Amino acid sequence: QRRVMGNSVIMVVRIGLLGASWIAPMAVLEPAKAMATTVAVTAVAARDVKAAERYAKKYNIPRVLPSYDALIEDQNIDAIYIALPNSHHHKWTLRSLEHGKHVLCEKPLASNAADASEMSQKAQQTGLVLFEAFHYRHHPYIARVKELLVELGTVRSVETKFCIPIFRGADIRYNFSLAGGAMMDVGCYAVNCLRLLLGEEPTEVTNASTKLAYENVDQETIAEFKTATGKTGRIHVSLFTMIPRIVAHVQFENGASLHLYNWLAPHILWNRISYTTANGVSTSERIRSTDSTYTHQLRAFVAAVSDGVPVETDHLDGVKNMAVIDAVYDKLGLPRRSSSSAL
């Protein structure tokens, strides 16, 4: 949809929400309010139409569609936000792309790398945007981290930790049939951050251990990696910890070091970047932004849809991220997650 403002014609990206999810208000609805000239959430669909109606009323969404298919096929929608269970990302992303819709898909992109690859191929065939919602990657905090990675030297090793308390056993993150597990939830973030900091892809999982919540469902996982050039990496992820930990540590060949605190959501409460140069000079910085990571992400998505601006968290990167997650499950002797044709 195009809107005239003064002497300019601005494209307004109309987004439909696939599912009445708890994350959409934070990830899309609130950011859209601050970007009303370029994006609008215009419709929602859920399995339960009554639930969708209540959701639409609560969040002032103009239209409720009777089904997921109706939302995807609607000609007055440009893009679909998918925040369904992991196991359903594959099916509904493919359908959205097939019906000419750009897609902002919650992480992880798919249940496994093979499904992610099929989604990526469909995005390339259609020429549409398929954007994986790693919101933290679009905040100025990460822009500063990238500068420091260049300034401090050659990376030797990286460790990322993402541990949070999810004690309710009925949470979908513990549901194997919905592609649950620690590696699929907090783990996909830790892997994504690890890959970013390493600057290259892990080629081998050298060691891995896990604690299971239920059969085939990891509650806590530690994995170690090696790259083709000899860099090493380590992740520690957990859904069962009393004290949340979202940190990352980078060691450089010249003795320099870099430490990231609250890299996931630097707009909430506090954040810090601490580093020591090869000469032993230590510095600590806090990165401030008036916008949340989600607002920066939605801005990047709209730019990709409206102007073709490239994004880092695209479908190609999503395939690489899922390949690492698959490799960890393989090393653990656990089955890779699968997609569902239900819903």
Image (spheres, helix red, strand yellow):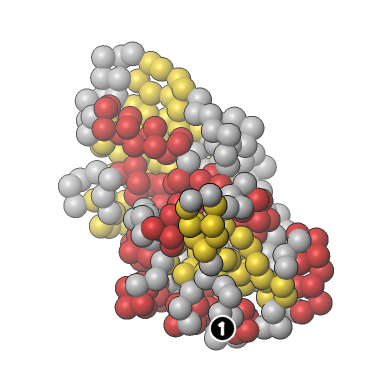
Instruction: Specify the amino acid type for callout 1.
Output: Glu
* 275 versus 77 height, above or below: above
Q: Position of residue 72 (x, y in %)?
A: 56, 79
Residue 269 versus residue 339: which sits nearer the camera? 269
Residue appearing at x 68%, y 64% in the figure = 21
Using the rendered image of the protein, determine whether residue 241 is visible from the camera's viewpoint. Answer: yes
Q: How many marks?
A: 1
Q: Residues within 10 Å of mark 1 (few under 14, many from 20)?
A: some
* 264 versus 186 height, above or below: above
Q: Position of residue 90 (x, y in %)?
A: 48, 76
Q: Position of residue 32 (x, y in %)?
A: 61, 53
Outermost residue, front direction? 7
Residue appearing at x 48%, y 68% in the figure = 103
Instruction: Report helix, strand or loop for mark 1.
Output: helix
The reply, left or right, for residue 169 in relation to residue 72 is right
* 339 versus 299 height, above or below: below
Outermost residue, left direction? 229
Residue behind mark 1: 73
Using the rendered image of the protein, determine whether residue 343 is visible from the camera's viewpoint. Answer: no
Q: Position of residue 289 (x, y in %)?
A: 54, 33
Residue appearing at x 43%, y 55% in the figure = 303
Residue 227 versus residue 88: which sits nearer the camera? 88
Q: Residue 332's quadrant in the figure?
A: bottom left
The reply, left or right, for residue 169 in relation to residue 40 is right
Quadrant for the C terminus, please.
Answer: bottom right
The reply, left or right, for residue 153 in relation to residue 222 is left
Residue 206 versus residue 167: which sits nearer the camera? 167
Residue appearing at x 17%, y 47% in the figure = 229
